[in-house]
Amino acid sequence: MKLHELTINKAQQLLKGKEISSQELTRAVLDRIAQVEDRVGAYITIASDSAMKEAALADKEISKGNMAELTGIPIAVKDLICTKGIRTTCASKILDNFIPPYDATVISKLKKAGAVIVGKLNMDEFAMGSSTENSGIKLTRNPWDLTRIPGGSSGGSAAAVAADMCIGSLGSDTGGSIRQPASHCSVVGLKPTYGRVSRFGLVAFASSLDQIGPVAKDVTDCAILAKVISGYDPSDSTSVPKDVPDYTSFLTEGIKGLIIGVPKEYDTAKGLDPQVFAAITNARKVLETLGAQCVEVSLPHTEYAVPAYYVIAPSEASSNLARYDGVKYGFRDKDSKNLMEMYKNTRSKGFGPEVKRRIIIGTYCLSAGYYDAFYKKASQVRTLITDDFTKAFEICDVILSPVAPTPAFKIGDNADDPLTMYLSDIFTLSANLAGIPGLSVPCGFSSGGLPIGLQLLGKHFGEEVLLKTAYNFEQATGFHKKKPEI
Ligand code: GLN
């Protein structure tokens, strides 16, 4: 096996046994990036020099016998998580030259665990999108088929892991942005419970929905990363003071007796591709042969998830993005003659079309006289969606569903059709609205060889049940072992 193909788990063992060094591993990953980046386009910034320095330090620690969870392992990060001294753009022209003066809490945690930060990954601008086509910086292609999108908004995070351009990565998920690209690229992605992972240093899109999570080559790696980044942080008032279990310790427990809820509304969802449906049905059978029992559950407000989300997320975004005015951060228009003109020109030139669309929708929804009709109403719908899950989880431990209604589509196919793009988020948005954890694990391929992911949803702080179920499924099926030919 080539070094860049290693999992975190395997790399840990080899580093510990001194069979490889972190410098060798990091060099192998950087070489792999150099080999495929012009085709995949996963990275906005490659931090070669600092990565090699961190790898040298890691090797010193290892020689002294000091191994933490990620010592010496090259990890890449979505470009909306602040990294001290490394440009953080949110894939936006407005932050093109922004170098954060501090690390996000998850970055401090990665560093404390010994990780080597190899670079920053492409995404839809400000995480608004489902294909990474909204990046203001570059295009990312799906390593399984370079004519197709990798998913989004954490498209770079998923593509880089799938193409072995890092050993693991972090993404963020506001409405599906970890799970959906993980599904399209045949990797494992976890959106943790809202409040499980600190958002301090995550550039805010929709603060009541955003959550950082891992993207990994398999479930074990996903569990390792989840443990490292989780936990209470006094700098994020929405993070929850609750102990973090060792997620890896649950994986090998079987799933005999586990009750899996299958939402009846999901089978008939509009636009569900028959091959995705077949893969999910097969996954259900696999889980049953492993001892789980499937029961029908109902999530009756599912059809309102898309409209509720597309009021709440843009409303919060319009407020959060007000800070990019050319004064405090990043890009400033130089030709303006007065302050108002400078604000207008900076924002007109700095933001891309989708971000502008969201700001306009959000500002409208929050405006006096409309607030009750839109934001308040959507918040009420959100409560109904949360109640649906609470009721469903009275009779099941995990909910099973597709991640995306179709496999990855061709680049450009939906680019002029925001509504179709929004509707494709139908299976992922509810978890963010309810704040529950969701995971995507590879569950098959279409006849054209495109990856399909299975979504598992859990109770608040039920990450270990999701990881355990996914691990059992992964071991029984082995879809994660197949690699794109690139
Ligand atoms: N596709 C959704 C959107 O465009 C979700 C994005 C995300 O999770 N960041 O808003």
Image: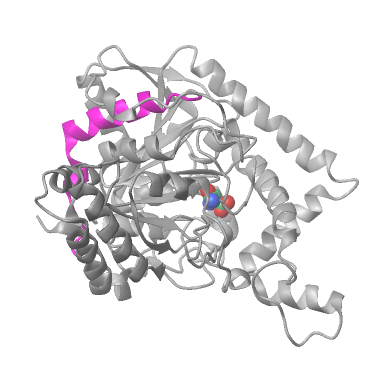
Residue 289 pos. (x, y %): 20, 20
Q: Quadrant of the N terminus?
A: bottom left
Residue sitting at 72 percent across and 49 percent down?
315
Q: How are the colours assigned in the image?
A: one colour
Image check: 293 left or right of 370?
Answer: left
Q: Is residue 478 magenta?
A: yes
- Tell me: residue 390, above or below residue 197: above
- Tell me: residue 89, above or below residue 349: above
Residue sitting at 43 percent across and 63 percent down?
120
Residue sitting at 18 percent across and 33 percent down?
475
- Residues rendered magenta in the picture: 460-486
Residue 303 pos. (x, y %): 59, 36
Q: Nearer the viewer, residue 265 or 98?
A: 98
Image check: 396 left or right of 194?
Answer: left
Residue 216 pos. (x, y %): 31, 46
- Tell me: residue 396, above or below residue 263: above
Looking at this rendering, what residue extends furthest in the front direction? 64
Q: Main secondary structure of the magenta part?
A: helix
Image check: 323 left or right of 149?
Answer: right
